């Protein structure tokens, strides 16, 4: 059966963006993500992710669920902008990725970037981590003077609330689905 999803496209500008702040829910203000944030009275670290973090990103996404990223490709971590919140370990190999946000695409020639691949481990939800990582990605893209957009399922009220708290506004609703080609 074809899967049809009712989606919302949201946009944010430098004027409407409200960065996560150091209130236990995010960074230290515009342009300065917090190096650590509190979650469950545990110190966690926000940092930019790269190719060396690909296995951790893929492991996190495997937790699945109804809103798990479904348009992820490993090159996005290498070529795009990704931030994660990590639980530190005794070494970098012992770190555990708790939340991630990144980009589907960055097209500087067109002046646009699409934020996506946002996901938080189910046991760490509701603690501001998705807000933190989404804020960091958004900030970096706005600093590049790009039009920043994201798409979200209309039924994902928690995500929409997070994006609105960062200054994203609804641009338009739309329907996404896979169609069939009929050849006559």
Image: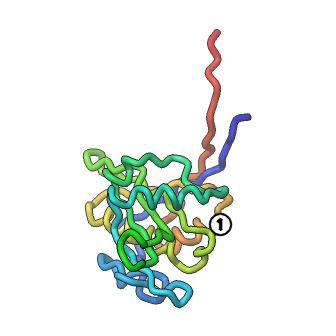
Q: Quadrant of the N terminus?
A: top right
Q: Which of the 4 quarters of the picture holds residue 102?
A: bottom left
Q: Nearer the viewer, residue 96 or 184?
A: 96
Colour option used: rainbow
Percent across and percent down for residue 39 are 52, 84
Q: Residue at x 61, y 21 (%)?
A: 181
Q: Taking 181 as reference, is 88 above or below it?
A: below
Q: Nearer the viewer, residue 94 or 133?
A: 94
Percent across and percent down for residue 85 are 44, 73
Res 120 seen here: yes
Q: Residue at x 30, y 79 (%)?
A: 32
Percent across and percent down for residue 109 are 25, 45
According to the picture, the residue beneath numbered tag 1 turns out to be 157
Percent across and percent down for residue 41 are 53, 90
Q: Residue at x 42, y 64 (%)?
A: 12
Q: Quadrant of the C terminus?
A: top right
Within-10-Å neighbours for mark 1: few <14, some 14–19, many 20+: few
Q: Taking 23 as reference, is 178 above or below it?
A: above
Relative to 13, 176 lies left or right: right
């Amino acid at each position: 059966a074809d899967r049809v999803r009712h989606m919302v496209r949201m946009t944010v500008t430098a004027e409407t963006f409200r960065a996560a702040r150091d209130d236990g829910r995010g960074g230290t203000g515009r342009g300065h993500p917090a190096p650590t944030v509190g979650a469950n009275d545990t110190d966690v670290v926000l940092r930019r992710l790269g190719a060396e973090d690909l296995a951790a990103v893929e492991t996190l996404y495997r937790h699945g669920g109804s809103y798990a990223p479904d348009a992820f490709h490993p090159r996005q971590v290498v070529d795009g902008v990704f931030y994660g919140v990590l639980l530190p370990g005794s070494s970098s190999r012992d770190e555990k990725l708790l939340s991630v946000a990144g980009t589907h695409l960055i097209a500087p020639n067109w002046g646009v970037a699409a934020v996506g691949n946002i996901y938080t481990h189910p046991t760490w939800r509701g603690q501001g981590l998705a807000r933190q990582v989404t804020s960091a990605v958004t900030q970096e893209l706005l600093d590049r003077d790009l039009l920043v957009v994201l798409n979200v399922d209309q039924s994902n009220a928690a995500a929409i609330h997070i994006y609105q708290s960062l200054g994203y506004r609804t641009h338009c609703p739309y329907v996404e689905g896979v169609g069939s080609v009929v050849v006559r």
